[in-house]
Image: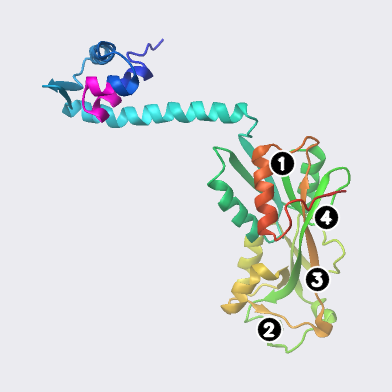
């Protein structure tokens, strides 16, 4: 079994002697006797078999080897401090991990903004962000397997926060036949290949589909196929707006101004109240979705 030849305290004393220019100065700062500091550094050097410091007059100077060990030892002591801080944070109830699940077809820019702000205040809390289809979101809620779920439907028995309404618009490639029409009717779309962002044989709840649906599991794949002239799709306006502006995709003009809408609900699946990290993230999410801090609803 490996036995360390040094202690964290020895490395801290070694750093203090260097930082404050000598044993006497470091002893005053650390509120220790100078002899105890001399003994600690001497024992450190003896254990390593390497000279780290040499004393000239009343000042201590690093040896070339000492310069290398100083840099490496600072990483060691910083790591110890971070571990001890993490222990204090966890002891206060701060969650080490938050698991977030978001439905694939929902826009998420406000969520990204909230996470960006949370990252600077996370205190070591890690984020696991997972994309899922509606059935996957339901399974996560049923199993209470996440801290926050963003879904297009509300669920009974758990806390639900309505966040926003998303407008979905039909888009296709500028080279697609539909792009050349001044106006498109729902009847004309029925005969076209539609890329449906869903899972397996899952259909869009409340949305009438076409006779030729291709079911695509990921938004990235849907956009890639659309750019290659394959079919059309109903996608969130916020997602496709930059692509329409750059003429990568074309937004179809629907007769009678037909629109499709979908709500985004924030679900808290767990039966226990959110911890301090989750509460902070919830506050940031409400802010970036433009909601009051106390706008919650129990379904």
Q: From the viewer's perspective, is 47 left or right of 190?
A: left
Where residue 104 sits, quadrant-wise, is: bottom right
Q: What secondary structure is marked by label 2?
A: helix
Q: Earlier in the sequence, mark 3 or mark 1?
A: 1
Write down the residue under mark 4. Answer: 153
How many other residues sit within 10 Å of disc 4, few (<14), some (14-19) or many (≥20)? some
Badge nearest the viewer, 4 or 1: 1
Tags 2 and 1 touching, CB below 8 Å: no
Q: Earlier in the sequence, mark 3 or mark 2?
A: 2
Mark pair 4, 1: CA separation: 17 Å
- Residue range highlighted in magenta: 14-26
Q: Earlier in the sequence, mark 2 or mark 1?
A: 1
Q: What secondary structure is marked by label 4?
A: loop
Mark pair 3, 2: CA separation: 19 Å
Query: The N terminus appears in which quarter of the rendering?
Result: top left
Mark pair 3, 1: CA separation: 29 Å
Tags 3 and 2 touching, CB below 8 Å: no
Q: From the viewer's perspective, is 289 left or right of 187?
A: left
Write down the residue under mark 2. Answer: 179
Which label is found at residue 260? 3
Q: Earlier in the sequence, mark 4 or mark 3?
A: 4
**Is residue 226 among the parts visible in the rendering?**
yes
Q: What secondary structure is marked by label 3?
A: strand
Q: From the viewer's perspective, is 101 left or right of 248?
A: right
Q: Earlier in the sequence, mark 4 or mark 1?
A: 1
How many other residues sit within 10 Å of disc 3, few (<14), some (14-19) or many (≥20)? some
Mark pair 4, 3: CA separation: 15 Å
């Amino acid at each position: 079994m490996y036995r360390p030849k040094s202690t964290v305290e020895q490395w801290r004393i070694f750093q203090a002697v260097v930082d404050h220019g000598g044993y006497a100065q470091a002893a005053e700062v650390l509120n220790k006797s100078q002899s105890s500091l001399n003994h600690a550094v001497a024992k450190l050097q003896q254990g390593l078999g390497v000279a780290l410091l040499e004393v000239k007059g009343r000042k201590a100077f690093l040896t070339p080897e000492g310069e290398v060990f100083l840099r490496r030892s600072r990483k060691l002591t910083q790591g110890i401090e971070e571990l001890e801080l993490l222990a204090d944070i966890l002891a206060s109830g701060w969650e080490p991990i938050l698991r977030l699940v978001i439905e694939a077809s929902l826009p998420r820019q406000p969520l990204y903004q909230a996470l960006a702000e949370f990252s600077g205040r996370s205190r070591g809390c890690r984020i696991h962000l997972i994309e899922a289809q509606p059935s996957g979101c339901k399974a996560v809620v049923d199993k209470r397997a996440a801290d926050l779920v963003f879904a297009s439907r509300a669920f009974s028995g758990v806390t639900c926060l309505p966040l926003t309404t998303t407008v979905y618009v039909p888009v296709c490639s500028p080279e697609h036949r539909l792009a050349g029409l001044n106006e498109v009717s729902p009847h004309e779309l029925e005969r076209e290949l539609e890329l449906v962002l869903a899972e397996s044989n899952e259909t869009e709840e409340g949305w009438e589909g076409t006779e030729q649906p291709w079911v695509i599991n990921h938004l990235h794949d849907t956009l890639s196929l659309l750019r290659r002239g394959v079919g059309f799709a109903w996608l969130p306006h916020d997602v496709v707006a930059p692509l329409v502006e750059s003429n990568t995709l074309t937004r179809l003009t629907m007769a009678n101004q037909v629109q499709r809408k979908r709500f985004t609900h924030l679900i808290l699946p767990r039966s226990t109240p959110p911890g301090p990290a989750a509460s902070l993230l919830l506050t940031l999410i409400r802010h970036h979705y433009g909601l009051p801090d106390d706008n919650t609803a129990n379904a």
